[in-house]
């Protein structure tokens, strides 16, 4: 038979530690269970807990809300005239792009042989017409002398006929002449009187005729003088002068190029007058108005201006607006220099407002309001918005604290605990 192992068994006496192990395990399990039960009774397990370091708060305040538009733009010359050719010819550009020029300085010249030839021809015609006018004056004096002689002879004949008529009167009284000779003397007197009256009328008519002819000749000479003066002006205009003090912008034609009349040649930029050109999103186009204040920022320098013009068309979903401002001495401006701007649309005094935040991305119909260590989702009504703040119409009171950033972790919860 096979013997059992009873001969190999050893009796072990239990120690104090082994006796207490089981009660300790049971007691620890009881404590954990009690803690879990207490936690479940004291706190709702459905409330989310968020660290306050991940959130940004803002207080609802009352004050003046400045409604504005943030945009960017560039500096443009308010006065940058383009110089055009006055005549067809060959252009000589006397100033390089970037050269400083004074007002009235010749910056380009146009050589127009056709215009100069016409000017000389018209000058010759003018000189010939002046000679013809002087000749006409001499002829008028000659004609006046001739009719004066006729008038004088008629006057002499009238005086002689009158004397013979008076002699005839005396002779007929003494019956020394016949009635026929007497009547013949009266006829001679009447004839001399008519000739004298006709001579007077001819003198007046000749005077008026000569005056009229000389006046016409003088008007023709004056017209030709105007033609010569205009051509002289066009000759002088071949010297293209800078209309303002500034710098040469760009050449629009090549040196010694043959150009036509009214062709652009170069630009002159007036450095004393700048404007800001802003690109405003088309969604704000209806809010813009001439004269609105604009805050222009050139780095650390801020300058105030006002809207001077608004483009009536939309390009690339933007509306172009011009801002006129007074430059200060400490501000160095250059063409096409970039800047940032803030168009001040309106001021809303005595309104509740809060700083902008990402809660607006959730539709802006609800806000998360702090209440001790809890955040409560609250329905709100928002109004006008600015770059940094937004008007609160309903759903809040002054002094409320809102969670304005970090709300993406709240999801759809109505209450969140802040730790």
Image: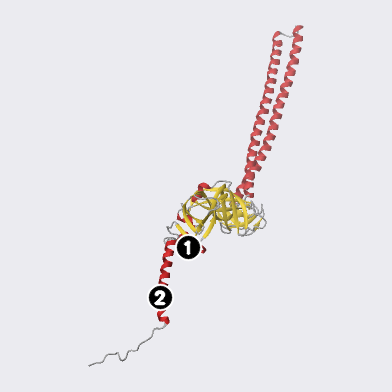
Q: Which residue appears at 71% of the width and 26% of the height?
A: 148
Looking at the image, the residue that sits furthest to the bottom is 1
Q: Nearer the viewer, mark 1 or mark 2?
A: 2
Q: Secondary structure at mark 2?
A: helix
**Could you say which is closer to the camera, residue 268 or residue 121?**
268
How many numbered marks does the figure carry?
A: 2
Q: CA distance from mark 1 to mark 2?
A: 39 Å
Which of the colour schemes (rainbow, by chain, secondary structure, one colour) is used? secondary structure
Quadrant including the N terminus: bottom left
Crowd band around label 1 with a 10 angstrom C-alpha radius: few (<14), some (14–19), many (20+): some
User: Is residue 248 visible to the viewer in this orientation of the structure?
Assistant: yes
Tell me, yes or no, if residue 114 can be seen here: no
At x 42% / y 66%, what residue is drawn? Answer: 36
Secondary structure of the residue carrying tag 1 is strand
Q: Which residue is mark 2?
A: 23
The image shows residue 72 at horizontal and vertical percentages of: 55, 56
Q: Nearer the viewer, residue 200 or 58?
A: 58
Asked if 87 appears above or below 217 in the picture, the reply is below
Residue at the limit of the structure toward the left, as seen here: 1
| Residue 381, horizontal then vertical, whole percent | 48, 49
Q: Position of residue 136 (x, y in %)?
A: 67, 35
Q: Nearer the viewer, residue 380 or 325?
A: 380
Task: In the rendered structure, find residue 50 and report the number of the disc placed on it.
Answer: 1
- Point out residue 291 in the picture as x, y percentages from the top left corner: 59, 46
Q: Does label 1 or label 2 sit earlier along the sequence?
A: 2
Give the side of residue 142 with respect to residue 277, left or right: right
Q: Which mark is residue 386?
A: none
Tell me if residue 184 comes above or below residue 221 in the rendering: above
Residue at (53% x, 58% y) in the render: 57
Q: Which quadrant of the figure has residue 139?
A: top right
């Amino acid at each position: 038979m096979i013997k059992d192992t009873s001969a190999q068994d050893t009796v072990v006496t239990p120690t104090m530690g082994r006796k207490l192990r089981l009660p300790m395990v049971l007691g620890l399990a009881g404590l954990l269970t009690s803690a879990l039960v207490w936690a479940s009774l004291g706190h709702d397990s459905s409330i989310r807990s968020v660290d306050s370091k991940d959130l940004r708060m803002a207080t609802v305040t009352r004050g003046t809300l400045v409604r504005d538009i943030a945009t960017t733009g560039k500096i443009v010359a308010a006065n940058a005239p383009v110089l055009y050719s006055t005549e067809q010819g060959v252009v000589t550009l006397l100033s390089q792009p970037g050269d400083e020029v004074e007002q009235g300085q010749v910056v380009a010249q146009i050589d127009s042989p056709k215009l100069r030839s016409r000017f000389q021809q018209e000058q010759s015609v003018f000189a010939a017409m002046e000679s013809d006018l002087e000749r006409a004056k001499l002829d008028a004096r000659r004609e006046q002398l001739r009719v004066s002689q006729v008038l004088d002879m008629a006057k002499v004949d009238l005086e002689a006929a009158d004397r013979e008529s008076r002699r005839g009167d005396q002779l007929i009284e003494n019956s020394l002449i016949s009635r026929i000779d007497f009547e013949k003397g009266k006829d001679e007197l009447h004839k001399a009187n008519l000739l004298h009256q006709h001579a007077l009328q001819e003198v007046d008519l000749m005077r008026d005729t000569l005056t009229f002819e000389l006046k016409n000749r003088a008007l023709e000479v004056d017209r030709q003088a105007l033609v010569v003066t205009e051509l002289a002006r066009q000759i002088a205009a071949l010297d293209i002068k800078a209309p303002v003090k500034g710098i040469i912008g760009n050449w629009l034609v090549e040196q010694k190029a043959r150009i036509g009349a009214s062709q652009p040649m170069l630009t002159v930029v007036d450095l004393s007058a700048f404007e800001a050109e802003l690109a405003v999103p088309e969604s704000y186009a209806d809010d813009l108005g001439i004269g609105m204040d604009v805050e222009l920022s050139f780095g650390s320098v801020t300058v105030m201006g006002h809207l001077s013009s608004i483009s009536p068309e939309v390009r690339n979903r933007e509306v172009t607006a011009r801002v006129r401002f007074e430059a200060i001495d400490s501000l160095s401006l250059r063409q096409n220099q970039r800047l940032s701007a803030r168009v001040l649309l309106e001021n809303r005094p005595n309104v509740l407002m809060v700083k902008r935040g990402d809660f607006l991305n959730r539709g802006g119909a609800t806000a998360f309001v702090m209440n001790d260590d809890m955040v409560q989702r609250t329905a709100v009504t928002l109004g006008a918005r600015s770059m940094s703040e937004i008007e609160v119409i309903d759903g809040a009171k002054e002094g409320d604290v809102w969670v304005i950033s970090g709300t993406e972790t709240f999801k759809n919860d109505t209450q969140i605990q802040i730790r």
